[in-house]
Image: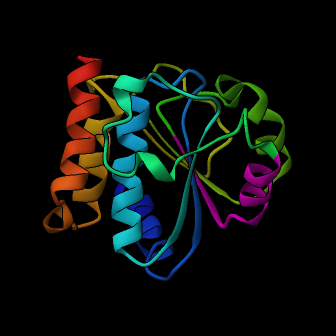
Amino acid sequence: MNNKEILEVKELLSSPKKIIITAHKNPDGDAIGSSLALYHYLIKNGHQVQVIMPNDYPDFLKWVPGNETVLKYESDQEVCDQHIRDADIIFTLDYNHLSRTGNMETILTEVDPIFIMIDHHQQPDSYPKYTYSDVSMCSTCQMIFHFIEYLGDLDQIDKDIASCIYLGIMTDT
């Protein structure tokens, strides 16, 4: 993201929005950690936020703060579709193409919110309005830390956000 885009995203997030956060199918520690770190940050800033994973993930990742709020598309498609349809913004984290969301791809291609991609994989697709892509980063969680920093909010990182960021950095490096 360049400085102009960071300012636009900061302005976009300056008033309460309905926000969805998604990650790739078969989510790993980086997908879960980055999604929940961003979830906690956005909740602190007055947004309505729902994390939706394409499917379930291993029990050893379910200790992370906010895990109990995550919806799984595979087991609750109707509810997830409604959340997605109602969204003002959809953050797509830790994947570079909508096809990596499995069955969620269909609904994600049918809606027209503002898409924001934060990802460290090569060859990001062009669907998002805003893309923060950096293949030199060890994890999307590291990028979430920098995203919060770019928005001028490092002081908002608390134990829950830090724990989520740590999960992704630890498991993706």
Q: Is residue 119 left or right of residue 111?
A: left
The majority secondary structure of the magenta stretch comes to helix
Q: Quadrant of residue 5?
A: bottom left
Q: Is residue 28 above or below residue 47?
A: above
Describe the colour scheme in one phrase: rainbow
Q: Is residue 18 above or below residue 91?
A: below
Q: Is residue 69 above or below residue 24?
A: below
> Is 150 contained in the magenta span?
no
Residue 135 visible: yes
Q: Residue at x 35, y 34 (%)?
A: 140
Most foreground residue, 134 or 58: 58
Q: Residue 31's x, y, as percent?
A: 43, 32
Q: Residue at x 75, y 35 (%)?
A: 104
Q: Residue 13's x, y, as percent?
A: 46, 72
Q: Quadrant of residue 61?
A: top left
Q: Is residue 33 above or below residue 121?
A: below
Q: Which residues are magenta?
A: 78-92
The C terminus: image quadrant: top left
> Is 91 contained in the magenta span?
yes
Q: Residue at x 50, y 25 (%)?
A: 57
Q: Residue at x 20, y 67 (%)?
A: 156
**Total numbered circles:** 0
Residue 1 visible: no
Q: Is residue 141 left or right of residue 4?
A: left
Q: Residue 24's x, y, as percent?
A: 57, 28
Q: Residue 146's x, y, as percent?
A: 24, 48
Q: Quadrant of residue 33?
A: top left
Most foreground residue, 37 or 133: 37
